[in-house]
Amino acid sequence: MFSAILAWIKSKKTFLKVQSGTGDNLLKEDIREGYVDYCLWSTFRPDCIDTDGELDMMCLDSGMFLFKDYPDANAALRACYTQAFDDAYDESDVIVLLEE
């Protein structure tokens, strides 16, 4: 089980953070529909990379993806990428920077 992934999306010049859910955001309706897990995702872009020690980031968007099976890190990244960018997952567009 993973806890978080940070990836750089080359085509969007944006970071994508995917975080494994803790279970407390599933609604009773979600559970009745067969969902067992979720991931939270956020996209960030640096305001400027010419910094003096601080890298300010603007949050662009965020969301939650529900799963009917417990996802591994790769499945979670693929699903959240597709939802975040409304585009098919492109492995060549993604650089995974950190995975915990």
Image: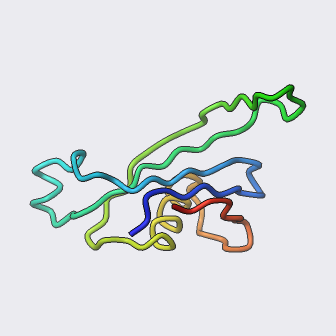
Q: Which of 48 and 81 is in front in this view?
A: 48
Q: What residue is shown at x 48% (from left), y 49% (from top)?
A: 41
Can you give x and y, in whole percent of width and height, for residue 50 in the image? 90, 31
Image quadrant containing the N terminus: bottom left
Image-based side of 77 in relation to 60, left or right:
left
Q: What residue is shown at x 49% (from left), y 41% (from top)?
A: 62
Image-based side of 50 in relation to 57, left or right:
right
The colour scheme used to paint the residues is: rainbow
53 over 24 or under it: above or below:
above
16 over 33 or under it: above or below:
above
Can you give x and y, in whole percent of width and height, for residue 20 in the image? 39, 56
Count of marks, rendered view = 0
10 over 46 or under it: above or below:
below
Q: Quadrant of residue 58?
A: top right
Can you give x and y, in whole percent of width and height, for residue 43 in the image? 59, 44
6 over 57 or under it: above or below:
below
Image-based side of 17 in relation to 25, left or right:
right
Image-based side of 71 in relation to 99, left or right:
left
Can you give x and y, in whole percent of width and height, for residue 3 in the image? 43, 58
Q: What residue is shown at x 30% (from left), y 71% (from top)?
A: 70
